[in-house]
Image (cartoon, rainbow, N blue to C red):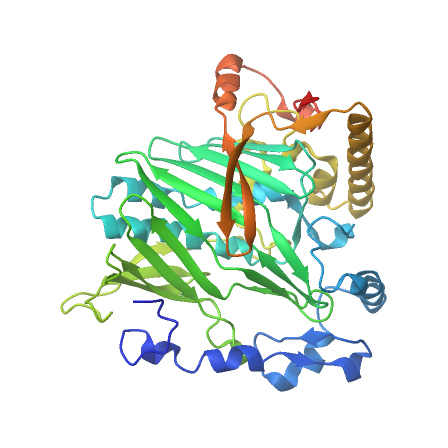
Amino acid sequence: MGSPKKNENKGFFAAMSSGISIFSSAMHRSVNGFLGYEGVEVINPDGGKDDAEEEAQRGRWKQEERDGYWKMMHKYIGSDVTSMVTLPVIIFEPMTMLQKMAELMEYSYLLDRADECEDPHMRLVYASSWAISVYYAYQRTWKPFNPILGETYEMANHGGISFLAEQVSHHPPMSSGHAENEHFAYDVTSKLKTKFLGNSVDVYPVGRTRVTLKRDGVILDLVPPPTKVNNLIFGRTWVDSPGDMIMANLTTGDKVVLYFQPCGWFGAGRYEVDGYVYNSDEEPKILMTGKWNESMSYQPCDLEGEPLPDTELTEVWHVADVPKNDKFQYTYFAHKINSFDTAPRKLLASDSRLRPDRYALEMGDMSKAGAEKSRLEEMQRAEKRTREAKGHNFTPRWFDLTEEVTSTPWGDLEIYQYNGKYNEHRAAIGNIDDFDNKSIEFNPWQYGNLSTE
C-alpha cells in the first residue's frame, strides 16, 4: 500500500486529500506584463490566482533593492546557486547552516521515547514526529550563512546530548554532523543541491540521515521531501515542502510514509501532513496526521487504512511556545543555539558562534556584518590559494571520508563518518573553570589536517 497522497477509493485520508492536487499547479501565475521582467512567477500562499500582481509589490525588498538583486541574479536561472553567488547580508539570519542542522535536536526527547518504546510501529511514530518537528523552524525565510571550510558547531547542555557538526567540503559544500546521548546516536552527511528559478529556488536535500536507537541497535534511515522557497525577490517569501517523507527501519523492514501536502489556493492543504506506519509486509498499522507547524497525532488502523473501532487520535508532538514578534522568527531553542549557554567549556576556535559577521548581524550592525562576511570569504579564498600552491589537501578533523557512495533521489552522495576524536578531545580538556568562550577568536583553519596525499 502506498502513500495516502494517491487518490484511492478507500482509506482514512481519501476524502481529506481529494481535490488538493488540482490547486498546486494552478496557483502559479506569471506577472511578466505587470513587472516588465521575463520569467517571474509570484505566488500568494493565502490567496487565489488573481492576487499575484498585488502580492508582487509586497516583501522585504525596496524597489531599488529588488531591481538590483534581479539584475544580479537572473543570469543564474536554472543553476545550482548553493555557493556560487555572493548574496547581500540583508537576506541573512544570524546563524550558519551548521547551527541550522542542530535545530533538529530541539525535540530530541521524541527519539528518547522511540528508544524506550517496545512497539516497533510506535517507535516510528515517535521518530518520524521528531523528523517533522524541525519544519516549524525551517519555514523561516532568512538565509543562514554558508560555513567556512573547517568551521564547526558544538552544542551541549540540552537533553544530555553532545552535538558536533563540521563543514567537510567547500566545493561542493558539504556538512557532517553527529549527536549522541544515552538513547540514540544521530549521523548525517548533507550536500544540499539547489535550482534557481528566478523568483523561487528548489532545494533538494541530497544527504543521508541515520538514527541508531541504542537499546536494541535499531537503525532508522530518513529521506525528507524537497523544499521550495517562493517569492525570493517579488512578494513575501514563503516556504513549502510538498512530497513524501520516508523513514525506514533498516533492521526490521518497517517504515513510515508521510505526505506533505502542497499549498493550494487560499492556503488549502498548507502545512498538512498525512500518512501511515507500515509493517515489513507493507500493511498499514498506524495512521498519522497533523500539521508540520503545529502538531502530529496518531491512531491505530486496519488493513484498509481506516481507524480501528474504539480508538481515537492521540497527539504525539506539539510545537513549543515561541517568542512573539521576533525579528528573525526564531524559536526559543534557536536563541539557545546562538548563545553560549549551550556551548561546552573551551569552544573550538572554529565554532559558528564566534563568527564576527554572524555576531554583528545578531547585534543589528548590518554594515559590519557585510564587511566581516566579505573579509572571511576573502580569507577562505586566500587559504585555498596557499594550500593549493603547497600541494596540500584539506581533510576534516572530526569526520573521515569513507569509500561508501550512496544514491539519493537527487544524486549520489559521498559519506563522511564521525571518527570519535571529538570525544577524546573533550576528555582531554576535562573540566576547565573560569574560561571565557567569548574571548576566543574565530579561526576555522586552526584544526584542519593538511596532507599531500
Q: Which of 428 and 40 lies nearest the eye of the viewer?
A: 40
The image position of residue 157, as x and y in percent, is 46, 31
Q: Please, is residue 9 above or below residue 74 in the view?
A: below
Tell me the quadrant of the picture where the C terminus can be found: top right
Q: Please, is residue 286 above or below residue 175 in the view?
A: below
How many numbered marks have been drawn onto this rendered protein structure? 0
The image position of residue 284, as x and y in percent, is 25, 63
Question: Which of the 4 image quadrants contains residue 303?
Answer: bottom left
The residue that appears at 59% across and 21% down in the rendered structure is: 346
Q: Residue furthest left?
A: 310
The image position of residue 226, as x and y in percent, is 53, 60
Can the viewer see residue 320? no
The residue that appears at 80% across and 76% down in the rendered structure is: 37
Q: Which of 134 and 149 lies nearest the eye of the viewer?
A: 149
Q: Is residue 45 left or right of residue 125?
A: right
Q: Is residue 255 left or right of residue 376?
A: left
Can the viewer see residue 409? yes
Q: Which of 56 and 179 lies nearest the eye of the viewer?
A: 179
Q: Please, is residue 251 above or below residue 420 in the view?
A: below
Tell me the quadrant of the picture where the N terminus can be found: bottom left
Q: Is residue 88 left or right of residue 178?
A: right
The residue that appears at 59% across and 55% down in the rendered structure is: 329
Question: Which of the 4 image quadrants contains residue 64?
Answer: bottom right
Question: Which of the 4 image quadrants contains residue 442?
Answer: top right
